[in-house]
């Protein structure tokens, strides 16, 4: 019987801790504030930004939205980032991705001052993660680790297979698992023999964006499965549903599985709020 590890429930507990931390910061004279920058009118981004604002407000974090038109130049976006960097009343800066094609995302993310980089995408934070020297950790990988912490006491020597090598999920989660002394294999679309590699894993983190990619016979009995995938698919009755990267109905022999939805997704937002509070604490130091 597989235990279903509900990220939404763990996220609620994290939010409770964040709320307490916000109150402590207020008592110390800091009003934790998150600036969210949205460029253009991508409908999915609109939804994500709204969710982040509501979640921030629910834990008492002030959230300030900056909405810029789709034709915004890189220069004007960089000017806004410079203003937010210099503003002592702003502790976290989040630029919602994707950005329109005239803007180089790397340059924009690299312009955010590292201690306000609550997404953890700045090269300094990426470097700190890979050297295990602190810094702000990307939200989805952090969420995966906090979920794993609920079910694994000692990671040392466990075999972890990460499916996907993106900068926002696959690579950072692999670094975090390595920090815990797992033996980590990072796989991707060109990996040969992925099912056999996956079958060796004690932990699988599936972040490929491919619905039902991880089949039951890819999974060793007793494995822990973290399903990061968010895939919108049309059902036969025409309804759109969200499914993960794991064929959950084939994985009864796994020890633990995170559901989709209500798995990693809510953890991502909870970790953004946690990072914002961490950034505000840094401002106090
Ligand atoms: P991405 O497209 O940037 O990267 C996907 C990675 O998966 C690539 O490295 C690619 O090589 C690999 N891949 C794709 N198909 C594969 C296959 N068939 N076999 C092996 N490897 C394959 O995606 P991303 O931004 O890392 O996101 C991955 C998934 O996670 C998406 O479904 C995305 O929606 C989801 N996601 C969820 C959250 C969350 O909060 N739950 C956050 C970020 C991303």
Image (tube, grey):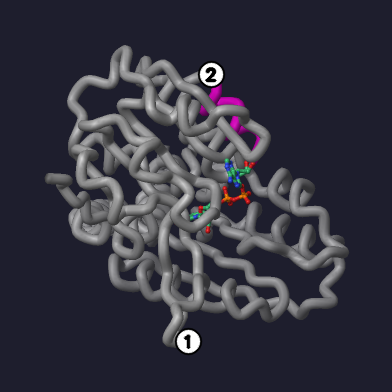
Q: Is residue 45 above or below residue 96?
A: below
Disc 1: residue Cβ within 8 A of ligand 1's nearest atom: no
Quadrant of the drawing holding the C terminus = top left
Q: Which one is nearer the viewer's eye here, 43 or 53?
A: 43
Image x and y of residue 182, in percent: 37, 18
Quarter occupied by residue 75: bottom right
**Disc 1 secondary structure class:** loop
Circle 2/circle 1 CB separation < 8 Å: no
Which disc, if any, is residue 131?
2
Q: Nearer the viewer, residue 216 or 134?
A: 216
Residue position marked by numbered label 1 in the rendering: 238
Provide residue 220's location: percent of width, then percent of height: 30, 30
Residue 81 tag number: none
Q: Which residues are magenta?
A: 122-130
Local crowd at mark 2 within 10 Å, few (<14), some, or many (≥20)? few
Is residue 28 found inside the magenta-colored segment of the image? Answer: no
Residue sitting at x 51%, y 60%:
89
Q: Residue at x 49, y 26 (%)?
A: 175
Dividing the picture into quadrants, the one containing residue 7 is bottom left
**Among the two numbered marks 2 and 1 on one chain, the one whose residue lies closer to the N terminus:** 2
Left or right of residue 180: residue 141: right
Residue 129 belongs to magenta span:
yes
> Which residue occupies 46% across, 26% down?
196
Q: Is residue 245 above or below residue 43?
A: above
Distance between the Cα atoms at labels 2 and 1? 48 Å
Q: In x, y percent, where is residue 223?
A: 27, 32
């Amino acid at each position: 019987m597989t235990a279903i590890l509900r990220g939404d429930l763990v996220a609620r507990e994290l939010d409770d801790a964040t709320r307490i931390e916000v109150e402590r910061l207020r008592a110390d004279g800091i009003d934790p504030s998150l600036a969210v920058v949205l460029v253009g009118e991508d409908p999915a981004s609109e939804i994500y930004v709204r969710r982040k604002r509501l979640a921030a407000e629910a834990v008492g974090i002030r959230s300030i939205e900056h909405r810029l038109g789709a034709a915004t130049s890189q220069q004007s976006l960089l000017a806004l980032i410079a203003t937010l960097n210099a503003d002592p009343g702003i502790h976290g800066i989040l630029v919602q991705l994707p950005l329109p094609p005239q803007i180089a995302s790397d340059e924009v993310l690299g312009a955010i001052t590292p201690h306000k980089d609550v997404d953890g995408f700045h090269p300094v934070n990426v470097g700190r993660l890979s050297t295990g020297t602190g810094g702000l950790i990307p939200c989805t990988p952090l969420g995966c680790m906090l979920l794993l912490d609920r079910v694994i006491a000692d990671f040392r020597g466990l075999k972890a297979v990460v499916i996907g090598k993106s900068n926002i999920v696959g690579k950072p989660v692999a670094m975090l698992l390595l920090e815990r002394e797992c033996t980590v294999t990072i796989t991707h679309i060109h990996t040969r023999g992925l099912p056999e590699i996956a079958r060796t894993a004690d932990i699988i983190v599936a972040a490929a964006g491919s619905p039902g990619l991880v089949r039951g016979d890819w999974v060793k009995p007793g494995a822990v499965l973290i399903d990061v995938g968010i895939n919108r698919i049309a059902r036969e009755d025409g309804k759109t549903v969200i499914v993960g990267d794991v064929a959950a109905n084939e994985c009864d022999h796994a020890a633990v599985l995170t559901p989709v939805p209500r798995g990693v997704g809510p953890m991502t937002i909870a970790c953004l709020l946690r990072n914002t509070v961490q950034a505000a604490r840094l401002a106090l130091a």
